[in-house]
Amino acid sequence: MTSTEPLPAWARDRVAELTGRLLPESSRIIRDTSEFMAIDRDSVVELGGELFLVTGTERERRFGLAGEPKFWVKRALALGSGSRHILKMVFHERFRACIGQLEVVCVRSAEKEAAVLDLVRGDPRYMNGRSVRDERGNLVRVIDFIEGETFLSRILGLPLSHEAYIESVFPGVLSAIAESLLAIERLHRSGLTHGDIRNDHIFVEAGSARLRWIDFDLDQDTPAYDVWSVGNLLHCVVAKGFITFQDAFEQRPELATALQEGDASVFFPFRVMNLGKVFPYIPAALSRVLEHFAVSGTVRYDRVGQVAEDLGACASSLRRPGDTTLFRV
Ligand SMILES: Nc1ncnc2c1ncn2[C@@H]1O[C@H](COP(=O)(O)OP(=O)(O)O)[C@@H](O)[C@H]1O
Ligand SMILES: [Mg+2]
């Protein structure tokens, strides 16, 4: 059975000091996180001898909308230091993803996320944290909370037309993304992967304006999944959002003859990957990078590092003195 113990008076006092809230006297310390659905705001969890006050359950915040709760991801305060954390609890999930002909099995692995956290500790291009086994042996990730917004919401929120975006901040965005991709290459060189490369798994840290990767627990048996996922990230970077064939035809009916099936993304066939046809002012070198991820592509990338190199070159050729930079590289 799970051992729980009444919350000592000092801990209740500390919670009151940190949050202004009084916990009920009946509050107990949770040491087994298996039943994470039952752990909620005002629960106190002990991990590695440290007490954490749970302040809420995280949600996937895509496009600025609050999505479904992720009951295995909690916001928390360390009662000792008062610092903010994300606690990620063990949640088993397995599904298949198809990328063209390639079928990939995806599993959640707390061990993989823990290994990444160990590898990247101190490197600001990733979230930082550690892993702790709870009383039942569940590998909980205790992650430093990053204050900021997702890369996706930053890009979508820019009050610029597409052409103005490409003309102004885009070279800087490309070099920041190239640097973030070098961080992914570092994982691959160590035999690890990110596993879920998405535009909302990069946080733009408030204050430093650094891009930092989050969420490493999804695992596949091939780094090819990461390489293909980079194509999805680039689609969003270049399109300043997402462009489906339907969007393209609605906005510009003349594209109905220009766009072909081969222009689709291999990963998400309803999205246009050959974006040069939609935005003729993007540089040809960038269109060639995108084509690696399109159905029409005849050459593919084997390594994320190659994409980083090509993007870095595009960024340098576009750079002008005095360019605005949104992100710190
Ligand atoms: N280090 C972090 N700092 C701030 N917020 C985070 C951090 N890690 C995760 N989150 C938030 O929690 C949400 C869910 O966490 P995530 O690791 O993406 O879980 P899952 O593996 O279920 O997708 C993220 O979308 C993000 O909003
Ligand atoms: Mg996630």
Image (cartoon, grey):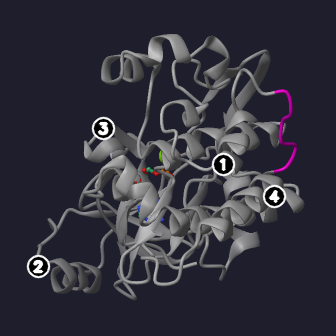
- Asked whether disc 3 touches disc 2, contact meaning CB atoms under 8 Å apart, the reply is no
Q: Can you identify the residue that label 2 sits on?
A: 20
Q: What residue type is labelled 3?
A: Gly
The crowd level at tag 1 (other Cα within 10 Å; few <14, some 14-19, many 20+) is some
Q: What stretch is highlighted in magenta?
A: 298-303
Residue 194, magenta (yes or no) = no
Q: What residue type is labelled 4?
A: Gly
As measured in the structure, the alpha-carbon distance from the residue carrying label 2 to the one carrying label 1 is: 53 Å
| Labelled disc at residue 67 | 3
Percent x, y of residue 91: 55, 40
Could you tell me which quadrant the C terminus lies in? Answer: bottom right
Q: Can you identify the residue that label 1 sits on?
A: 286
Q: Name the element at disc 1.
A: helix
| Labelled disc at residue 305 | 4
Label whose residue precedes the other's in the sequence (3 or 4): 3
For the image shown, how many numbered marks are present on the structure?
Answer: 4
Label whose residue precedes the other's in the sequence (3 or 2): 2
